[in-house]
Structures are given as C-alpha cells and as structure tokens.
Image (tube, rainbow, N blue to C red):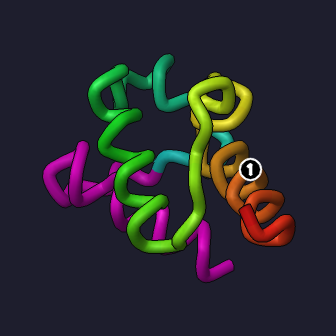
C-alpha cells in the first residue's frame, strides 16, 4: 500500500528522527508515545497539503488518527468522497 508507506515515512522522519523501530501499522501512536496533540496537528497539515483533503475539527479523534491503519482508512474514505 503506497498510502500506508508514505504515512509511515512521514511519521518516522517527523516524530522518530528517522529511526523506524519496526512498529506495526495498527500500533497506537498515543500509547507508544509517537505523536502527541501537537504532532496530530502536524500530521493533519501534512495530509491536507499532500493529499488535498480537508479534516474537520470533529474528525480529529483517535478513531481516525491513532494508528497507520486508522489514518489510512480515514483518508481513503475522505479521498473517495471527494472532501
């Protein structure tokens, strides 16, 4: 999956200083301590700019942004709906 790979690359470069420790796609960003609330905003800015989707305030919930699986599923829905 290209999307998951691009998301992983951004997370590793932005939040893990380029050191991918092999975390799985379904690991919680918050539980693992990878991304905090400020990091979520950086992640939102990245996906809005790179993929041209808009993220509404009510969509900023762990169900959408707490793992690569959740984030890629959320983004696929947004891209398919054209929002």
Where residue 21 appears, x then y in whole percent? 35, 49
Q: Is residue 15 magenta?
A: yes
* x 37%, y 67%: residue: 9
Which element type, helix, strand or loop, lies under badge 1?
A: helix
Say which quadrant the N terminus sits in: bottom right
Residue sitting nearer the eye, 33 or 59:
59
Q: Residues within 10 Å of mark 1 (few under 14, many from 20)?
A: some
Q: Is residue 13 above or below residue 17?
A: below
Furthest residue to the bottom? 2
* x 60%, y 50%: residue: 68
Where residue 6 appears, x then y in whole percent? 47, 72
* x 47%, y 21%: residue: 30
Q: Is residue 26 above or below residue 82?
A: above
Q: Is residue 33 magenta?
A: no
Where residue 70 appears, x then y in whole percent? 71, 43
Residue sitting nearer the eye, 65 or 34:
65
Q: Is residue 54 above or below residue 52?
A: above
- Quarter location, residue 59: top right
* x 44%, y 46%: residue: 44
Where residue 29 appears, x then y in whole percent? 48, 31
The answer to whether residue 69 is left or right of residue 77 is left
Name the main secondary structure of what is drawn in magenta: helix
- Quarter location, residue 10: bottom left
The answer to whether residue 67 is left or right of residue 30 is right
User: Residue at label 1?
Assistant: 74
Say which quadrant the C terminus sits in: bottom right
Residue sitting nearer the eye, 44 or 36:
44
What segment is highlighted magenta in the picture? 1-22
């Amino acid at each position: 999956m290209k999307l998951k790979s691009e998301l992983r690359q951004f997370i590793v470069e932005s939040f893990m200083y380029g050191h991918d420790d092999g975390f799985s796609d379904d690991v919680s960003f918050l539980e693992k301590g990878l991304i905090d609330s400020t990091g979520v905003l950086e992640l939102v800015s990245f996906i809005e700019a790179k993929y041209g989707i808009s993220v509404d305030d009510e969509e900023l919930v762990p169900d959408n942004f707490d793992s690569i699986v959740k984030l890629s599923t959320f983004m696929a829905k947004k891209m398919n709906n054209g929002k």
